[in-house]
Image (cartoon, rainbow, N blue to C red):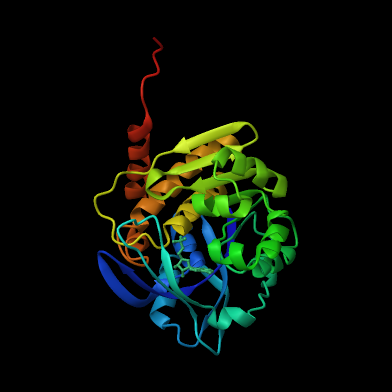
Amino acid sequence: MSLLVVGSVALDSVETPFGKHERILGGSATHFSVAASYFTSVNLVAVVGNDFPDGHLELFKKRQIGLEGLEKQTGPTFHWKGKYEYDLNQAITLQTQLGVFESFDPKIPANLKQPEYLFLANIDPRLQYKVLQQMSTRPKLVALDTMNFWIQNSLEDLKQIMAKIDLLIINEGEARQITGESNLMKAWRKIATLGPKTLIVKRGEYGAIMFQDGHVFSAPALPLEEIKDPTGAGDSFAGGVMGYLARLQATDWNTLKQAIIFGSAMASFNVEDFSCQRIVNLSLEEINERAQSFYHLASFESDLL
Ligand code: AMP
């Protein structure tokens, strides 16, 4: 049940209509690994600077996330500054400072080179490629996330790594930006030609939609009353999806559908507070209960006329 993730571990400065916080724990690999840690054992590959507070490392340890692949270097930790206005689906990036990620050259420790499941979380596609290249055996499933920053600045690198993966997990805007297609079915057809056999499109408060061959599955998002900060929703969604697949040791269509529900449950917890504050202290009962509420939200009798 091994799961490896490479991505950003960051200090985020975030403003939403519900509060403003400076230099809180963030990063794609952070939200991902905390969410996935409820399902399976997770190892993290990333780099932080010497300004990274020790207290944050304790949070990873508390969730038993393997930190052997987390390097500490002299320099500033990756810093993302963003805000959300009333449309919480739309993050507005104010600043991206790569810091120690700029010169990061990941060296995967020998005992982490055979994960069964690999998640290339949102980070420079060249780093995603370097990590995949170092695997001594091809993982059962390789999934990838990215964002507008990389699509805009490194599309060719992104296409190179996309050719090597099985599952692409991106949001609606990113699917359109990569393909130039506004229709999601058409975007999926183009993405399939770039490599991935399966595409999951995250649609924020409207849920998620998955494509594979001729199949399509759509999952709702829970209508939540308490949303404070959507940062990391996509990563915690992916953490739930990949964690669930690793736990069940399966990647078939039905398991993927269930995985999306658990991913959606993890994302719904993540947005209830800033940083990882809400998802760091969950119980399995809470997670199961929330996953169950998706079933009630979307199930109906299918009597015909
Ligand atoms: P999301 O799940 O899409 O809301 O991801 C939010 C996280 O992505 C934040 O905690 C940021 O630190 C991180 N992030 C923002 N921009 C980048 C980037 N260009 N590369 C990697 N991670 C980023």
The image position of residue 245, as x and y in percent, is 55, 46
The image position of residue 72, as x and y in percent, is 55, 83
- Number of marks in the image? 0
Q: Residue furthest bottom?
A: 74
- For the point 45% across and 47% down, which residue is it? 203
Q: Residue furthest top?
A: 305
- For the point 62% across and 49% down, which residue is it? 167
**Left or right of residue 90: residue 213:** right
- For the point 36% across and 58% down, which residue is it? 270
> Residue 217 versus residue 254: which sits nearer the camera?
217
Q: Quadrant of the C terminus?
A: top left
**In the rendered view, would you say 252 is above or below 12?**
above
The image position of residue 155, as x and y in percent, is 66, 62
> Residue 192 versus residue 243: which sits nearer the camera?
192
**Left or right of residue 81: residue 106:** right
- Judge whether residue 37 can be spotted in this image: no
> Residue 6 versus residue 174: which sits nearer the camera?
174
**In the rendered view, would you say 78 is above or below 113?**
below
> Residue 196 versus residue 41: which sits nearer the camera?
196
The image position of residue 254, as x and y in percent, is 55, 34
**Quadrant in which residue 301 is drawn:** top left
- Judge whether residue 222 can be spotted in this image: yes
